[in-house]
Image (cartoon, rainbow, N blue to C red):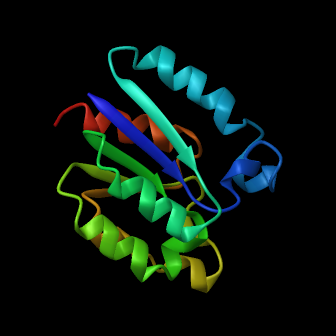
Amino acid sequence: MKILIVNGPNLNLLGTREPEIYGTVSMEDYLETLETQFSSFELDYYQSNIEGEIINRLQKDNFDALVINPGAFTHYSYAIADCLKNIQKPKVEVHISNIYKREEFRQKSVTAANSDAVLSGFGMDGYRLAILSLSKF
């Protein structure tokens, strides 16, 4: 199974960005852990700060399942929401922090309705939990 992991804006700064919220582990380091734990899967990682680039990557359609952390696009990108709606593959939305304990504008996800599940507040472990859930499909 090929699982695509997509991160949105500013998530390229994981490990240094607001460590009290996002932790001190970079996504690249965490990917090594995931690749070891899920060696029977092919994990493909993509990150962009640009909405259209994320949509273009999703529309390549060369994966079996999706883990997506849209970052700030979660709260206002109807374009990414529409793209997710057209993906007929298992998909899980992940948020490192608990978005419901944050600022009011972060408490609404316009993309979540087009995912099969949402994980929020498990830290980086949310990615592992998402892959684990996708492995059951």
Between residue 125 and residue 8, name the one nearer to us. Answer: 8
Dividing the picture into quarters, in which one does residue 8 lie? bottom right
Residue 20: image location, x then y, percent: 79, 53
Residue 9: image location, x then y, percent: 65, 62
Residue under the point 65% across and 38% down: 27
Residue 108: image location, x then y, percent: 47, 80
| As drawn, 116 above or below 133 | below
Between residue 1 and residue 105, name the one nearer to us. Answer: 1
Residue 93 in view of the camera: no
Residue under the point 31% across and 65% down: 84
From the image, which quarter does the C terminus lie in? Answer: top left
Between residue 40 and residue 62, name the one nearer to us. Answer: 62
| As drawn, 108 above or below 43 | below
Residue 98: image location, x then y, percent: 55, 62
Residue under the point 56% across and 21% down: 33
From the image, which quarter does the N terminus lie in? Answer: top left
Please give left or right for residue 81 compared with residue 31 in the image. Answer: left
Residue 40 in view of the camera: yes
Residue under the point 34% across and 52% down: 92
Please give left or right for residue 37 compared with residue 46 in the image. Answer: left
Count every numbered label the image shows and give the total: 0
Please give left or right for residue 22 compared with residue 76 in the image. Answer: right
